[in-house]
Amino acid sequence: MTVASGAVQLHHIVKQFSTDGPIVLDDVSLSVKPGEFVSLVGASGCGKSTLLNILAGLETATSGTVELSGSPTLMFQEAALMPWLTAGKNIELALELRGIPRKERKDKAQELLDLVHLERSYDQRPHELSGGMRQRVAIARALAQGRSVLLMDEPFAALDAITRDFLHEELTRIWQETGITIIFVTHNVREAVRLSERVLLMSSRPGRFIKEWNVGSNEPWRSDSTFSSYVSELASEITDNLRKEIVRHAN
Amino acid sequence: MPTESANPGVSAGNDLDLKSLEAGLDALETPTLHKFSVKKYLFSLLSPLIAIGAVILIWQIIIWLQWQPDYIIPSPSQVWAALGQQAEHQILWQSTFNSIRRAAQGFLIALVIATPIGVALGLNKTLRAIFGPLLTGLQQLPSVAWVPAAIIWFGLSDATIYTVVLLGAVPSIAIGLMNGIDQIPSIILRAGHVLGAKGFTRVRAIILPAAWPGYLAGLEQGWAFSWRSLMAAELIAVSPALGPGLGQMLDNGRSLGDMALVLGSIFMILFVGVLIERLIFAPLRRRTLLNRGLLR
């Protein structure tokens, strides 16, 4: 089933890994508009990564339907770059698999490296880059696929605080420049509030959406000095809800 | 806009601050790298000569002690002379060249046969369960055991020699590739899936390069098995129709009771093995480790 480019529709998704196993996702429905930035937060076991894998086609839902225009791209906690290729060639691989002619690839790869501020890293290999740089190459590679939906599975969880901070700004900028739809999974509530327009809280075992917050999307508001205090307030409100959900499992 | 989102123009100046901050952080966090050193390279290339020198010295001391007559243990100079005599009649060069050519051709054919086998068994659990044990068994069977059968089937011909070489090399290369595929981190396979790599493209662009370290180990062992299988085959299948080879030269020495020629032939076989390892496999291995940041 297809929807408008960049839109994502999930209808009543249920996921069980085995017929007598626990229900991981229970009747999950979600509607994401083209170009929207949505974050999914929740404690361990809420099935948020499973949900992304279903969206990415790495797993299939037990029941329910997924509506997407074309396949989305997915970023992991690790950059997952091919260790035998340079940064530039990693991006070229994505372009090649997308069907871009050979002679256009190098320029496009360089443009994408420029976009993530790694213009001089074309010939560097993954092990020669820092964790933050690798993750930026991974963003460039994801963009190289030319997909309209980007799924991100805790992409900054393994980075140090300073680097993560930069990557937040970087991702916001790239999202605004490209107009790509982003579904972002994290257990860092502050990160979710800071980055996205909408935050969805998931319950654990089984995973369901239990509450939703609108952060608001207009750009001037984001660069406003009051934004960071707003982020803190909203983040603590969501954290309270998250803690209630965790406490529920104590008994 | 989203569909054409892959290549927006270079960003405007308002993020210049972020850009320079990032550049600073990148510079601070980039790991320092191995620098190529000519001195180290020359040392790694020439260091085996130290061992060779030591062996020749001990050998010469044994000769000076006159412990055994020279038809049992000839001196280094006698062996050198025996090789020189073969060289004079061009037999040494013809034999060496012929043997290397046969081993290389056999190895390349083995490579072509073993690669699809390794990929198929590496990716398909069912095929692996059916054919895996057979392949492991073949790898452990000394391929010289096939010489009598090959002679009965093909007579004293090149086909006999290639059969033995292939049966020696194919299992090693296929198993090496299979192990290489087993060791691919699952995150690489998932990334390949997300990138949309399928079928043959997946094998070419993801599976083979990702499995390369194990594949290379298999190739190295496959070459070693080619070379030793070839020597066994040449030693047993001696015929003027086959032309000279190092194995035949060795057998020739044995039948003449010429110990200097026997030892000289053994050294030539050894020398070719070391040469191929140093000139082809060692640089390939080094490059592989260097490219993947695995060199210590």
Image (tube, coloured by chain):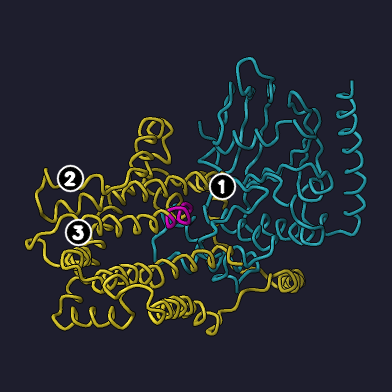
Q: Check if residue B208 falls in the magenta segment.
A: no
Report the span colored magenta: B210-217
Judging depth in this view, the residue of B94 and A78 nearest the camera is: B94
Chain A color in figure: cyan
Determine whether, in the image, residue B16 is placed left or right of residue B104: right
Label drawn at residue B234: 3
Tags 1 and 2 both on a single chain? yes
Total numbered badges shown on the rendered structure? 3
How far from the left and from the top, in percent, is residue B275? 36, 72
Camera-nearest residue between B113 and B164: B164
Where residue A128 sits in the image (x, y, percent)?
Answer: 62, 67
The one of B287 and B59 positioned closer to us in this rendering: B59
Residue receiving disc 2:
B148
Looking at numbered disc 3 in the image, what kind of residue is underneath it? Glu
Q: Residue at x 49, y 64 (%)?
A: B288
| Nearest to N terminus: mark 1 or mark 2 | 2
Q: Residue at x 13, y 80 (%)?
A: B89
Distance in Å between CA atoms under marks 3 and 1: 42 Å
Colour of chain B as rendered = yellow
Q: Residues within 10 Å of mark 2 (few under 14, many from 20)?
A: some
Could you tell which of marks 3 and 1 lies nearer the N-terminus? 1
